[in-house]
Image (tube, rainbow, N blue to C red):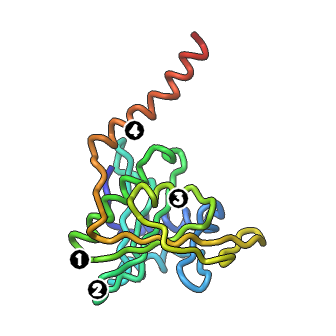
Amino acid sequence: MKLIPLDGPEHFERVAGWLARKENHQWLDFGNGRQDFTPTLLKVMAQQPTHFMRLYTSDRDDTPIGIVGLTRVDRVFRTAMFWGLSGDKSFRSRGISTFASSKLMTIAFRDLGLHAINTWAVEHNQSTRVIERLGFRLIGRQRQCHEIDGRLYDRLLFDLLASEHRELDEARWRRSERLHRQAPYAAETALSG
């Protein structure tokens, strides 16, 4: 898995395509309820110091399968807001987004010099598991502030301090990914044997 900068028209088109899907954008809010993005807007964001975004790849090749990012990067108060998105759902539930997010947190704290990163997730969203695996702590709840299909949901608020971050061990992560890939084969063998 690699983290690569978001640059070039093909990257902006790819991410805009991911964000255009309701299954993705319904969980996001980039301010004032904004959930839609054009390639041009992504390019502008990528050039601003208040945004830091990286595409992540699988181990198979360098094709981007998701994005992790920081918005509202504040160099004075050393804070930022974390977000992420799995673009290629065929790689979901393998820990890749968790590992990519962990690497981004390391860059944020070590290279960008941030002290605290916060994030939120809509209640019942699978991303809360990723957030918790990264060491974020639940700090609150915004009640009924996120609407999906006419229904109101709470947002769960989390934060992580630089002193609390522990980057995930890549070797251990690779072993668990290998086991995950072997599990369907083992289950298939058990059913057919």
Residue in view at x 34 percent, y 81 percent: 79
**Marks 1 and 4 in Cβ contact (< 8 Å):** no
Distance from label 2 to label 1 (Cα)? 8 Å
Please state which of residues 110 and 142 is positioned toward the viewer in this rendering.
142
Distance from label 3 to label 4 (Cα)? 18 Å
Q: Which mark is residue 127?
A: 3
Amino acid identity at mark 4: Glu
Q: Which residue is mark 2?
A: 75
Label 1, residues with CA under 10 Å away: few <14, some 14-19, many ≥20 = some
Q: x, y (%) of residue 69?
A: 40, 69
Q: x, y (%) of residue 98?
A: 41, 54
Q: x, y (%) of residue 172?
A: 30, 41
Q: x, y (%) of residue 141?
A: 58, 74
Residue in view at x 56 percent, y 16 percent: 190
Instruction: Answer with mark 1 or mark 3, whichever residue precedes in sequence.
Output: 1
**What kind of element bears circle 2?**
loop
Q: Which residue is mark 4?
A: 177
Q: Kindly indicate the quadrant of the structure image that contains residue 187.
A: top right
Q: Which mark is residue 113?
A: 1
Label 2, residues with CA under 10 Å away: few <14, some 14-19, many ≥20 = some
Circle count:
4
**Marks 2 and 3 in Cβ contact (< 8 Å):** no
Amino acid identity at mark 3: Ser
User: Is residue 102 something one can see in this rendering?
Assistant: yes
Distance from label 4 to label 2 (Cα)? 35 Å
